[in-house]
């Protein structure tokens, strides 16, 4: 079994003293590709915040058995203020700076690596543009570049498909599969239709967490895990319907 990178151990967490997650445990190993599904408000983003150290849990621990690791994070698109006066270059380079150290000086090689990555993403012509001039999908590409520019051991993605059209979606999925050769990935997605073809295992978060060590999703399985998502199959592609949505 590959090395354990991070462990959520019996986490209870929430806001203003009210728990959203109760007794959540999850192991993340090298080369894992874990899809996180679950209903709106089930606590998926809250779990990511605990993993990233942004939110202190009420109970439980986050462990990094091999020592602290570098984690790349793509936040939900709705959390991004697109009117913030910052350029594409600055966003991607921020992925190479320590947290809250905006004035940190980057080497020439680091700046070149940021530019190279933007070029690979086909975004180099926007290098000096403010992020407010990008389309939603273009911004997602730039934010993904920011998340991976430091070559993290773990990449955490919160709904990366938001604003992304079908063409870029398949490009994004190829990109993620390639990245997964070198880094573990945890991906939150509502897109139950495409998630099985992308990930290696699935966890359903709905206050508690149910881990399924395979990428196969069936309605029966979701019922067993008390995950209030119905799957409707259209040919080979299942679609999802959220209960109480
Ligand atoms: N900063 C906050 N302060 C108070 N409550 C919050 C805060 N952030 C989230 N919540 C609440 O915590 C619950 C879980 O939210 P969370 O964003 O983790 O769910 P989610 O599973 O990621 O949902 P979605 O699928 O809609 O993105 C929700 O009821 C939400 O209203």
Image: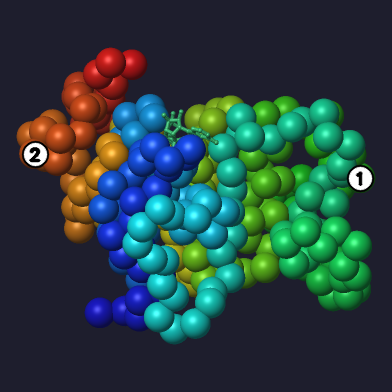
Task: Please say if 138 is above or below 29.
Answer: above
Residue in the foreground of this view, choosing between 119 and 180: 180
Left or right: residue 172 compared with residue 39: right
Location of mark 2 (residue): 224
Location of mark 1 (residue): 128
Residue in the foreground of this view, choosing between 138 and 174: 138
Give the crowd class for mark 1: few <14, some 14-19, many >=20 residues within 10 Å: few
> Quick one: quadrant of the C terminus?
top left
**Nearer to us: label 2 or label 1:** 2
Disc 2 and disc 1 in contact, CB within 8 angstroms: no
Q: Is mark 2 on a helix, strand or loop?
A: helix
User: Can you tell which quarter of the image residue 214 is in?
Assistant: bottom left
Q: Position of residue 17 (x, y in %)?
A: 43, 41
Query: Which residue shows up at 25% across the image and 79% down it?
Result: 1
Furthest-top residue in view?
Answer: 244
Residue in the foreground of this view, choosing between 102 and 136: 102
Query: Which residue shows up at 44% across the image and 83% down it?
Result: 66
Q: Where is residue 128 in the image (x, y as percent from the top left)?
A: 91, 45
Mark sitting earlier along the chain (2/1): 1
Furthest-bottom residue in view?
Answer: 66
Left or right: residue 32 compared with residue 85: left
Query: Which residue shows up at 36% across the image and 41% down it?
Result: 19
User: Can you tell which quarter of the image residue 104 is in?
Assistant: bottom right
Q: Distance between the residues labelled 2 and 1?
A: 50 Å
User: Can you tell which quarter of the image residue 34 is in?
Assistant: bottom left
Query: Which residue shows up at 67% across the image and 68% down it?
Result: 150
């Amino acid at each position: 079994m590959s090395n354990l990178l991070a462990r959520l151990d019996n986490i209870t967490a929430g806001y203003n003293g009210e728990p959203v997650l109760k007794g959540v445990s999850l192991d993340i190993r090298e080369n894992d590709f874990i899809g996180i599904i679950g209903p709106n408000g089930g606590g998926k983003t809250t779990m990511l915040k605990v993993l990233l150290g942004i939110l202190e849990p009420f109970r439980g621990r986050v462990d990094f058995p091999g020592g602290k690791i570098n984690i790349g994070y793509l936040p939900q698109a709705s959390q991004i203020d697109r009117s913030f006066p910052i350029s594409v270059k600055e966003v991607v380079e921020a992925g190479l700076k320590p947290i809250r150290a905006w004035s940190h000086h980057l080497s020439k090689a680091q700046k070149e690596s940021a530019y190279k990555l933007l070029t690979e993403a086909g975004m180099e012509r926007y290098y000096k543009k403010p992020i407010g001039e990008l389309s939603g999908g273009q911004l997602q590409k730039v934010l993904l570049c920011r998340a991976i520019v430091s070559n993290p051991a773990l990449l955490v993605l919160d709904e990366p498909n938001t604003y992304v059209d079908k063409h870029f979606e398949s490009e994004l999925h190829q990109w993620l599969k390639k990245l997964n050769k070198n880094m573990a990935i945890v991906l939150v997605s509502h897109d139950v239709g495409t998630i099985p073809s992308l990930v290696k295992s699935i966890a359903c978060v709905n206050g508690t967490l149910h881990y399924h060590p395979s990428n196969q999703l069936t309605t029966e399985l979701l019922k067993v895990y008390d995950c209030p998502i119905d799957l409707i199959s259209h040919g080979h592609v299942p679609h999802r319907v959220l209960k109480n949505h």
